[in-house]
Image: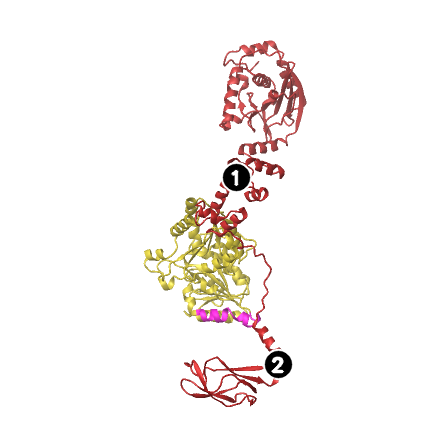
Amino acid sequence: MLYREALNKALDEMMSRDSSVVLLGEDIGFYGGNYKVTEGLYARYGEKRVIDTPIAENTIVGTAIGMAIGGLRPVAEIMTVNFSLIAFDQIVNQLAKIRYMSGGKITLPMVIRMPQGVAKQLAAQHSQSLERLFASIPGLRVLVASDATTAYYGLKFAISTDDPVIFLEHLLLYPEKMEIEEEKHFSPYRARIKKEGEGITIISYLKMLHDTLKAVPTIEKELDTTCEVIDLCSINPLDVETISKSVKKTKRLVVITEEPKTGSYANEILNKVLEEVFYELDAPPLKIGAEDVPTPYNRTLELASIPTPEKIAKQIIIWGRKHGI
Amino acid sequence: MEYKITMPQLTDTMETGKIVRWLKKEGDFVEENEPILEVETDKAVMEVPSFRSGVLKEILVEEGEEVPVGTQIAIVQTEIEKKEETTPKETKEEKEEITISIPQESQEEGQKLPEGTASPSAKRLARELGIDIKIYQEKGLLPIPAHEKDIKELFYKNFFDKDALELIKRYSLSLEEIVKHLKKEKITKKDVLEFIQENNIPQILPISDIQLKVIENLKKSTSIPVFHIYEQIKTGNLPKVEDITLTVWIIKILGDTMQNHYRTRVKLEENIYKIYPNSNICIAVAIEEELFMPVIKKVNKKTLREIALELKILKEKAQSKRLSLDDITGSTFSISNLGMFDILSFDAIIPPQRVGIVAIGTQKRGKTKVTFSFDHRVINGREAALFVDEFKKRFTDTDYLNNLKEEPLNKDLSQS
C-alpha cells in the first residue's frame, strides 16, 4: 500500500459510513486529486460529495466552514500548505474561533488536509513547512501523518471529531510504500515510539521521521549508544508526557523539523519539554532544521538547505561527542 | 475621597507647565469639568478643568511656579465620599496589591545543586552522591563541563576499591543505594559483602543457552511414565585393566546386554517404534555446573579401550564446548554415574527420547547399587526385569569378562 492510498482508504471508509462527509478542493473530483489522494471517490460518491472548486483557497475554507455549521462534515483539500496562506483569514478568524465565540453552540466538524514540505525543485514558494503557524492558533487541532498508520487512523479521527482539524501530509510521502499497522485503540494525540533506545531521544515527524530512521544506524554505531525515535503525530496538542518520559530515560533530546530553524515548531517542543525535564538532561538539547533561507530551486542548494539523513547523522554525532557520549 | 490634580500634559512636547492663575480658592466648590486653573505650556495658556466635583481642599503649587508634568498641584475633596475620610485610602492600597496563591510543591529541584559547570543531570547525580563538582574541577579531576558519566567514573574511582566494584557489578547493585547505606569515604569489598548479606541480596546468574536447553528437555522428561528397578551388581571382581574405569566397564556390559533386548534400542515416535540395531549409549558428563550427554555409538562393536578413548575425547569436547550435534544425538539408553561422589544410590531422570537410564552409585564391599528407570510406553516390567537380570549376571560371568579384557582392537563381539 502507498501512503496516499492509506489516506484514500480513510476518506472512502468515512464517506461510506457517513453521508454527511463531503470533500471539496481543487481538482479532487474528476481529475482524482493532484496527488491522487481522492482517486476513485468522484466515481463512487458523485459530484455532490466530491466537489471540484475554483482556485480560490479562502473560498474553499469559507465554504467548508459554512457546510460544517450547516451540519456536514467537510474535508477540504488545499493543494499544498503554501496556498493555505490565502485562506488564513478564514482559518484564523473563523475556523479557529467560531466554536469558542458561540459558547460551544456551533461545532465545526471539519478537516483541512494539505501536504507540505520540500519536494523536488518546486522552489521557495512551493516548498514550505508551516506547522508552526497552525500550532500557534488556539482553537485548532493540528495532526501530522508521518506514515500509513497515522495517515489512515489519524484522518479517520480528524473527520469524526467535532473539533476543526488541520491535517498535514508530506509531498514526498505520497508515493512511498508502507503498511497500515493494525491499531485497536488509536490515540490521535499520543506520540508514537517508532524505535526504542536508551541513549538519545529524537523527536520528528513527516518526512524527517523517515530521514531520522535512516540516520539512526550510523549514529548508534559512531556514538556506541541507542536512539529512541518518536513520531510526534500531533502538533497541537503536544504529547509532552511521552516525550518527557523518554527524555528522563535517555537524558538527551534532539528535535528535527523541516521548518527553518528560526521560529520553528521545534522551539515549542523544546520549551514545553524542558520545563518538565530540565534537571534530567545530561546535554543541551539539539535542534536540527532547515537553513534560514527561502528553499532554493537548484537541487544541490535545495538539499543543502534542508536536513538529510547524512546531515542528521553528522550533526547528532558531532553534538554527541561534544556533550559527553 | 480625595482627588489629586496633577500637572497635565497638554501638548505632545510639553515637559513642564507654569501655573498662571488659580481660578478657585481653597474651600471653593468645583463642578465636574469646571476650569480650576490656567497653565502656561510651551505653546499657549490653557484652562485646566477638574474631572470630579468637590471642594478644593488644598492648593499645593502657587501661582507663577513651574513644575514638571505629573506633579501634584491640588487636592479636591469629592463630596460623596467625604464622610469616609480614612477608610478609602486603605482600600485603594489593597487594590494595588495582587494576590496569588503558590502551590506548595516540592522546590527541591534546582535547589542546593552543587556548584561547578555540569549538565543538570550530572549535578543532580553529584548531589545524590555527595560530590562537590567545583572542587574536583578546580583540581582538574573533572572535565568542564562535566556529564553524568564523568561523575559516575569519579565516583567509582573515589569511593570504591576495585574488588568492591567487581562485586557490585556481579550483584547488579545500585551504587547510590550503597553509598546512602554505608556512608563511608572508601567502600571496600568487605563493606559490600556485609551490605549484601544484611539485605539478603541475591546474585543474578544468567542461565546459559545450553542449560536452558537442558531445562526444556527435563520438562519433557517429566511427561514420561517411569518405573524403576533397583539392583545391586558385583563390581569388585572385574578384571583389572589399566585405564579402564568402572564406567567404561558398565558402558560396555550395558551395550552388550542391550543387544539381547531390542526394546532398549527403541526410539518412540508418534505412532511407531524405531528399533536401532546398535547399542548407542549416552553418558551424563558434568562440566563445572553444566550437564552434557555425549553419545558413544555402537558400543556393542567397540572394545573397552576404544570406549575409554572415545569417552575421553567426548569429555574433552564437552569441556571445551565443542560437542557437535552428532556427538549428542542418536542414543537410546543413558548412564549416570555418581559413584565417584560416594553416593550409595539414586535414581535419574530419563532424557527425552531414550528408553531408560541407569544410575550408578558408589562401590561398597565389591558391590554397586544401580537404579534403572524405564519409559513404560516402550518397555514393560517383565522385559525390563529380564534386561536388568542379564546385565547383572554378566558381572559374574568370568569368561565373558576375561574375554572383554583380552579382546583385541576392533574385534566384533556384538553377538556375545
Q: Quarter-wise, where is residue B331 in the image?
A: top right
Q: Quadrant of the N terminus of chain B?
A: bottom right
Residue range in magenta is A87-106
Picture colour for chain A: yellow
Residue flagged by tag 1: what amino acid is it? Phe
Where residue B282 sits in the image (x, y, percent)? 56, 24
Whether residue A181 appears in this view of the structure is no
Where residue A298 sits in the image (x, y, percent)? 32, 58
Which of disc 2 and disc 1 is earlier in sequence? 2
Query: Quick check: A223 above or below A9?
Result: above
Q: Is residue B349 magenta?
A: no
Q: Which mark is residue B332?
A: none
Query: Quick check: B120 above or below B156?
Result: below
| Pick the front one: B19 or A255 | B19
Secondary structure beneath dot 2 equals loop
Q: Is residue B7 left or right of residue B88?
A: left
The answer to whether marks 1 and 2 sit on the same chain is yes
Query: Quick check: B206 above or below B338?
Result: below
Where residue A170 sits in the image (x, y, percent)? 43, 58
Residue flagged by tag 2: what amino acid is it? Glu
Question: According to the image, label 1 marks what residue?
Answer: B160
| Pick the front one: A188 or A130 | A130
Question: According to the image, label 2 marks what residue?
Answer: B85
**Residue plotted at (44% across, 85% down):** B18
Predominant SS of the magenta segment: helix
In which chain is the residue bearing label 2? B
Secondary structure beneath dot 1 equals loop
